Amino acid sequence: MVRPEFHAALRPWLLPGERLLWAGLPKRGLLLRSADLYLVPFSLFFIGFALLWNQGVWRWGDTPFPFAVAGAALLLGAAYVSVGRFLVDAVVRAKLLYAVTDRRIVILRRPPWSRFRALDLSCLPVLELQQGPGGRGTINFDVPPDLGWWSHAHQPEWTPGLSKVPRFLEIEGAASVYDLVSRECERRRAERLAGLPPDRAALIG
């Protein structure tokens, strides 16, 4: 059963005749992941480096302007990776709403940072469940492009709520939602194949 407030928020984005099967929210508040086991120590190292840099620069007395700017930038960066990223991520996740319809996967980020994404169930690139404790988990529907070791595919996500990978992040009852998406994918693919000529259906199937 979809909560009325979710249905009201998603109604403007539904296609004619499209039925809403499930809607839910990501985990609220502070979100810690396995990646934070090395991101947090790195952020502490970054803070120490920024503090040492600024201490050394300001001891000179007549601080050159470029060094002062670099020191301020380091402090801002250290503040973000240590604390700011958790605050930004919590705010972004508070605006996210996920849904499964009989046709699409829907990811809606509500104002003031509005963004809408939808994926056709008949041709999802990936369907992956990452199960966590208490029934919570993440469902990935795609993977980032792998363009080398410097690409997004090999970089940690400092702010999961802003991920470029379409996903349902840390939702309740992730396994049951995964099963729902799996069933709807199979149904949509079967409908798609049924509407094709036999020769083309055989190639796709």
Image (tube, rainbow, N blue to C red):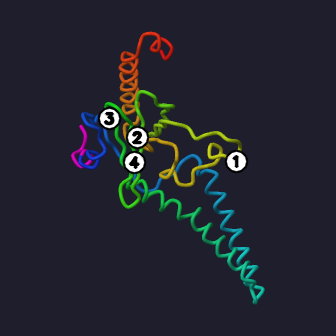
Do the residues under discs 1 and 2 have CB atoms within 8 angstroms?
A: no
Q: Distance between the residues labelled 3 and 1?
A: 36 Å
Q: Earlier in the sequence, mark 4 or mark 1?
A: 4
Q: In this view, does 42 lie above or below 140?
A: below
* Magenta stretch, residue numbers: 1-7
Which quarter of the figure has residue 137?
top left
- Residue 116 drawn in magenta: no
Amino acid type of disc 3? Thr
Q: Earlier in the sequence, mark 1 or mark 2?
A: 2
Where does label 2 land, which residue? 118
Nearer to us: label 1 or label 2: 2
SS at circle 1: loop
Where does label 1 land, which residue? 150
Q: Earlier in the sequence, mark 4 or mark 3?
A: 3
Do the residues under discs 2 and 4 have CB atoms within 8 angstroms?
A: yes
Amino acid type of disc 4? Phe
